[in-house]
Image (tube, grey):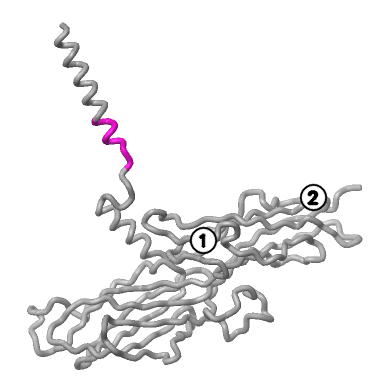
Amino acid sequence: MVKRAGNLLLIIIASLCILLISCQRVPGGEREQDTAAALQQVKTGTKGVELSLVPNYPPATIYDQNELIALLEIKNQGNHNLEPGDCFVKVTGFDPSILRGGLDLLRPCEENIETLEGKTVYNLDGGFNQVEFKASNIALPHGIFDYQPNLNFLVCYNYQIIASPQVCIDPLLYQVSSLQKACNYRKSVAVGGGQGGPVGISRVGVDMVGNRAIFDITVANLGSGTVLSPVSDLQGCGDATTVSRQDFDKVAYTVRLADATGTCNPRDGMVRLSNGRGKIICSFDVPGTTAYETPLLVDLNYNYMNSISKQVRVIKTPQ
């Protein structure tokens, strides 16, 4: 009887040990397949800075003797970190002589947190911050009993992505049997799903002319916002007196191919988008004797503007 009780105790202890071990949390990156999936999620996507409002802030209806408070949630769902000076939010669409007390002030996205981080393999949701906008004084004009502005919450930020599609280089195109080659440059290059930001590469075409590789790169606005030149004034974003028409739809770029030398068009390093798309044509000298695959590095730098809105109703307090 004592022996059976001892065996039972050993079984219970062993079972508890197995249970405890199986319940332990696996640190990020410990499983190779999990790390690869997380890295793929970080490298792809078409989102950047996303805005939302805390429910009932601002309320749909408010009396003019109350404060109007709006709580704006800011999420960096791309993979580029936003440092001080990289991102600003503001509220437009209202009469500042009616909604007074600071509602119209420009605010940094990373207020009180220094850096609004992008998504990583350890944080796939990206960084988060909350900014409070307040109209501490509401002054309805004489004879006005109802005011219904459409509050527009605008974000303007600088973003950068690096696309690295794997391309096939074939210096001796017609001199070697296709069965002896490691890759086929005519096969399409996979670039779908974005590269972790609202502007990215949507297509890469490859052609070989002798020992020169020619790349036809399509840059696209993959988000719902507006693309601006990276040299435009972020703090004046949305202000017609600061941002001109010449600032719209411009993306700065650089293209690299291992140690190969080459040239790209447009020559000024700035691609213009038309209907949300633009072209970069690059040509590289690729000496060699065998076909091989290598990453084509495309660096895009741009400013981006997006917004959400909410209509509020200000009612004169009954006397």
The percent coordinates of residue 266 (x first, y second) are: 42, 90
Callout 1 crowding tier (Cα within 10 Å): few <14, some 14–19, many ≥20 = many
Classify residue 152 by image quadrant.
Answer: bottom right
The percent coordinates of residue 193 (x first, y second) are: 37, 67
Disc number for residue 66: 2
Classify residue 228 by image quadrant.
Answer: bottom right
Residue furthest to the top in view is 1
Which quadrant: the N terminus? top left
Res 104 seen here? yes
Up-down relation of residue 105 to residue 164 (above or below): above
The percent coordinates of residue 250 (x first, y second) are: 50, 82
- Assign the magenta stretch its main secondary structure: helix
| Nearer to us in this view, 160 or 189 | 160
Classify residue 129 by image quadrant.
Answer: bottom right
Residue type pointed to by label 1: Leu
- Left or right relative to 48: residue 141: right
Helix, strand or loop for disc 1: loop
Residue type pointed to by label 2: Asn
Res 173 seen here? no
Which residue is found at the position 67% from the left and 55% from the top? 70
The residue singled out by tag 1 in the image is 116
Would residue 189 be counted in the magenta stretch? Answer: no
Which residue is found at the position 19% from the left and 11% from the top? 5
Callout 2 crowding tier (Cα within 10 Å): few <14, some 14–19, many ≥20 = few
Up-down relation of residue 208 to residue 182 (above or below): below
| Nearer to us in this view, 86 or 141 | 86
Q: Which residues are magenta?
A: 18-25
| Nearer to us in this view, 283 or 259 | 259
Tell me the distance, in whole angstroms, between the alpha carbons under discs 2 and 1. Answer: 32 Å
| Residues at marks 2 and 1 touching, judged by CB atoms closer than 8 Å | no
